[in-house]
Image (tube, rainbow, N blue to C red):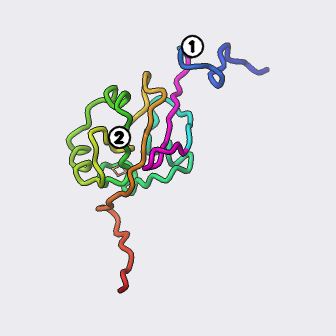
Amino acid sequence: MSQKSSFDCSTATWSNNATCTWNRVHFKDSKGNLIKTVEANEGDDILSIAHEYDIDLEGACEGSVACSTCHVIVDPEHYDLLPEPEDDENDMLDMAFGLTDTSRLGCQVKLARGLDGITATLPSATRNMFVDGKKPTHH
Ligand code: FES
């Protein structure tokens, strides 16, 4: 016996999905081209979602706020809905390459109601202070 949900969240639009807990997230590359739109649940963070869907967002410290490789640029409309970054996030963001007014650490941005349609744009480069990823240089 299968119990069917009375409401199919997979086909709902945001305006009529009051019982759904997922959000759509648009990932864009540094040039603003859409990479992928995915659906994720409330409570999921942008970094985990990116990894789940093979988006190239590094996350070298795995969410312990000790790097800036999960830096994403959030669209201004949704940025304003996010809780303020903690001090440790701000410290790491200061080291992020290509910091903008709406930059956040992807591992610290958790989806919540109202964030449907959030856009996370990947910066053109990241600076990794956490893992030694130096490439040998030749001249
Ligand atoms: S993964 Fe290192 S700060 Fe987010």
Q: Tell me whether the residue at label 1 lies in contact with that at label 2, contact meaning CB atoms closer than 8 angstroms.
A: no
Q: Residue 30 in magenta?
A: yes
Q: Of residues 88 and 29, which is closer to you in this image?
A: 29
Residue at 37 percent of width and 37 percent of height: 74
Q: Of residues 60 and 2, which is closer to you in this image?
A: 60
Q: Residue 114 in magenta?
A: no
In the image, residue 130 sits, relative to residue 93, either above or below, namely below
Q: Of residues 75 and 23, which is closer to you in this image?
A: 75
Residue 134 is situated, as x and y percent measured from the top left of the image, at 35, 72
Label placed on residue 25: none
Residue at 56 percent of width and 33 percent of height: 39
Magenta part of the protein: which range? 19-35
The three-letter amino acid code for the residue at tag 2 is Gln
Residue 40 is situated, as x and y percent measured from the top left of the image, at 53, 34
Residue topped by disc 1: 16
The three-letter amino acid code for the residue at tag 1 is Asn
In screen coordinates, is 84 left or right of 16?
left
Residue at 72 percent of width and 18 percent of height: 4
Residue at 79 percent of width and 20 percent of height: 1
Pointer 1 or 2: first along the chain: 1
In screen coordinates, is 25 left or right of 59?
right
**Outermost bottom residue:** 139
In the image, residue 87 sits, relative to residue 67, either above or below, namely above
